[in-house]
Image (cartoon, helix red, strand yellow):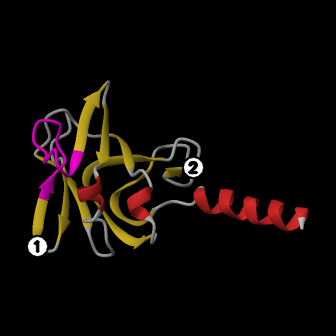
Amino acid sequence: MGSLLVVWGLAVILADHGEPVTFAFLRGSGPVEGREHAYDPETRQYLLDVHGIARFEVRHVVDDLASRPVVFRVTGMLDESEGPLELQVDGKKYPLDPKDFDKTLFQVERKGGVTTITFQPAGKTLLKPGAAFQYIDFYRP
């Protein structure tokens, strides 16, 4: 009985370290340099890099997404880009710019060249297969 509890406990811990959202990185996006996977199970954050014209899509979302944090730490974006990062879902666009975002859906901060995006409960409901993130920066200085 004791070993059964240990095995079950280990399964719960391992399941908790899986990424809540799986992405397909299509263009100009992916994990930060030096990482094979964007999701960091220790910090429970996505460590992303975007540049140029970037696009990535949601492929899968876990069933218990509402109870899990979804936080992006994004590098590579300019302070003033042509097309700030945005989430596109169901024909609507949601800006993820520190100067322009819906506070009921997201919290967006930029500090030291890193943009941190925290999805609020209502924002997490937008994360579903087919939802896309896009960033446009034609003119990098």
The x, y position of residue 76, in whole percent, is 32, 40
The residue type indicated by label 2 comes to: Pro
Residue that label 1 marks:
91
Q: CA distance from mark 1 to mark 2?
A: 31 Å
The x, y position of residue 111, in whole percent, is 29, 26
Circles 1, 2 touching at the beta carbon (< 8 Å)? no
Query: What residue is drawn where x is 82% and y is 60%?
Result: 6
Residue at the extreme top:
112
The kind of secondary structure element at disc 1 is loop
Is 23 placed left or right of 77 in the picture? right
The kind of secondary structure element at disc 2 is loop
The x, y position of residue 88, in whole percent, is 18, 65
Sequence-wise first label, 1 or 2: 2
Residue that label 2 marks:
41
Q: What stretch of residues is rendered in magenta?
A: 94-106
Is 43 placed left or right of 84 in the picture? right
The residue type indicated by label 1 comes to: Gly
In reply to whether residue 98 is colored magenta, the answer given is yes
Query: What residue is drawn where x is 57% and y is 49%?
Result: 41
Magenta: main secondary structure: loop
Is 16 placed left or right of 97 in the picture? right
Q: Name the quarter where the C terminus is drawn.
A: top left
Query: What residue is drawn where x is 57% and y is 60%?
Result: 18
Query: What residue is drawn where x is 28% and y is 50%?
Result: 120
In reply to whether residue 28 is colored magenta, the answer given is no
Which one is in front, 127 or 132? Answer: 127
Is 46 placed left or right of 110 in the picture? right
Residue at the extreme front:
1
- Looking at the image, is 115 positioned above or below residue 21? above
Q: Name the quarter where the N terminus is drawn.
A: bottom right
